[in-house]
Amino acid sequence: MKSTILTITSAAVLSILASCNGTTKTTTVNNTPAPQSGQLPNPEMNKKHSPDYQPAFEGQTRIEGARTKTAYQVDVINEKLEKPWGIINLPDGRFLITAKAGYMSILSADGKDVKKIEGFPEVDTKAQGGLLDVALDPDFSNNRMIYWTFSEPVEGGNHTAVGKGKLSQDEKRVENPQVIFRATPTYDGDKHFGSRLVFDKDGNLFVSTGERSDLATRPLAQNTMAYLGKVLKITKEGKAAAGNPFLDNVKYKPEIYSYGHRNPQGLAMDEKGQLWEAEMGPMGGDEVNLIKPGKNYGWGDVTYGLEYSGKKVGAGIQQKAGTEQPVYYWDPSISMSGITFYTGNMEEWKNNLFLGCLSGEKIIRLVIKDNKVVGEEWLLTDQKERFRDVLDGSDGNLYGITDSGKLYRISKK
C-alpha cells in the first residue's frame, strides 16, 4: 500500500458481479491530477542492496515518478486459472493462456468460458519449469499454427525447447506437435528457463533462454557455443534466421542474436520494431535492455546486483568494455516476468512499457522517450499478486495473469 500512495491517490469502489467462475471484482480508480510544480518521487523507497554501485548515466535507475491522470477500472474476470505463464489474444479476441502443468486454455473475451487444449509434449514441471510461453504464427488465420516454449525432460536433465503444432478445428488438441529447437546443453536443474517468444515483422521468431541459475552454468551466458543465457532468432522451422549477426562466425552458434543474459522472461517489440528485453538480476540488478544484434549484455561479468549471499558477483563491476548497459535497472529487485508495449485506449499510456512483477507484486509502467526511461509508475500494488505476464489486448485494454490463477483487465473508465 505504501507504494500505491506514492504513485497515485485513489478512491476505490468495489462491486461484486456474479460469473460462472465465481466472482468478477471491479475496482474503479479515480486519480488526482499530478502536482503543477515539482517532481513526483520515484515509487521505490527501500534501501538499495548495493548502495556503492552507481548508475552509468543519469536516469538509469530510480527515475522520477509518473502518475496516471485518466480514471481506469480494474476487473478480475477469471480467478481459476491453473498456474498460468503466458497469455496472448486469438484473432477473434479470445485469450490463449498456457498452464505450467502442460496444457493451454482458450478463454472467451469476458473470461468466463474456458476450453482446454491438450496433446502437448511432456513437460518438466519442477519449480520454474513447465509449459511456458506461447505465440501465434503470423499466418495463424490460414494455417492455425501455434508455437510454445517448455522445459523438456530428457536423459540428464532438461532444457528450454520450442515446439509448434496446429490447433485442431474443435480447439481441443494441438495436432502434429514437434520440437523445432532445443537450447542445449541439457542441465539437471529447475530454474531460469527464460522462454519468451516474439515474432518479428519478417516472420522470424525471437526466443529468450536463461542461464539455468547455478554457478556451474553461469559461464555459459558468455559462452557463444552454448544456447543458455541468450536471445535467439530462428525461423519457423527452428533454423538460424537470415541476417543473424554470427551466421558466418564459427565461434558462435548461428542462432544467437544477443548474449550475456541471466533470466530473460520478458520480450516485446515497440512501435518502431525494436526488440526490448527484461531480465531478473540476482539480489538487485533487474534490467530492461534494448536488444541489438550481436551485442553482449554482460552477465555474469557485469551486474548491478549481488549474490543472494550478499557477496559481490565476480569482480563486482558494473561497466566493462564490450558489454551493453541496461536502459534501466532496479535495486532492490522487482522480479519482472512478461512485458508488453501498450497501444490501447488510454492515450497517456500509448507506447509505454508495462512489466508484470513477481516478488514485486505489481505492474510497473515505464514512460520511454528516445529509448530512455523518463517516468516510472507502480500499479495494482494493493492486489498483492505475482503478475506473471501482461498483454496489450486487441480490444484496447491491458491484461495481466497472476501466479495465483487470476486474469485481470485494466480498462479506461
Image (spheres, rainbow, N blue to C red):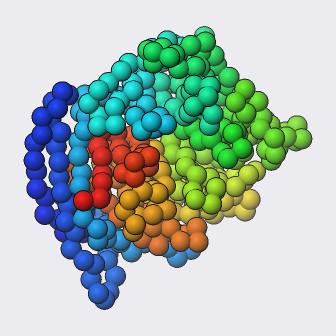
Q: Residue at x 50, y 42 (%)?
A: 265
Which quadrant of the rendered structure holds the N terminus? bottom left
Figure check: 272 above or below 62 = above
The picture places residue 193, in percent across and down from the top left corner, at 53, 32
**Front residue (pair 386, 312):** 386
Numbered-mark total: 0
Q: Residue at x 76, y 30 (%)?
A: 239
The picture places residue 31, in percent across and down from the top left corner, at 22, 69
The picture places residue 4, in percent across and down from the top left corner, at 23, 62
Which quadrant of the rendered structure holds the C terminus? bottom left
Q: Residue at x 35, y 71 (%)?
A: 66
Left or right placement of residue 217 versus residue 69 in this view: right
The picture places residue 111, in percent across and down from the top left corner, at 29, 34
Q: Report if residue 222 is visible in the image.
A: no
Left or right placement of residue 70 versus residue 134 in this view: left
Left or right placement of residue 156 versus residue 12 in this view: right
Left or right placement of residue 354 versus residue 328 in this view: left
Q: Report if residue 14 is visible in the image.
A: yes
**Front residue (pair 43, 392):** 392
Check the image and name the residue furthest to the bottom.
37
**Front residue (pair 312, 179):** 179
**Front residue (pair 4, 79):** 79
Q: Residue at x 13, y 58 (%)?
A: 12
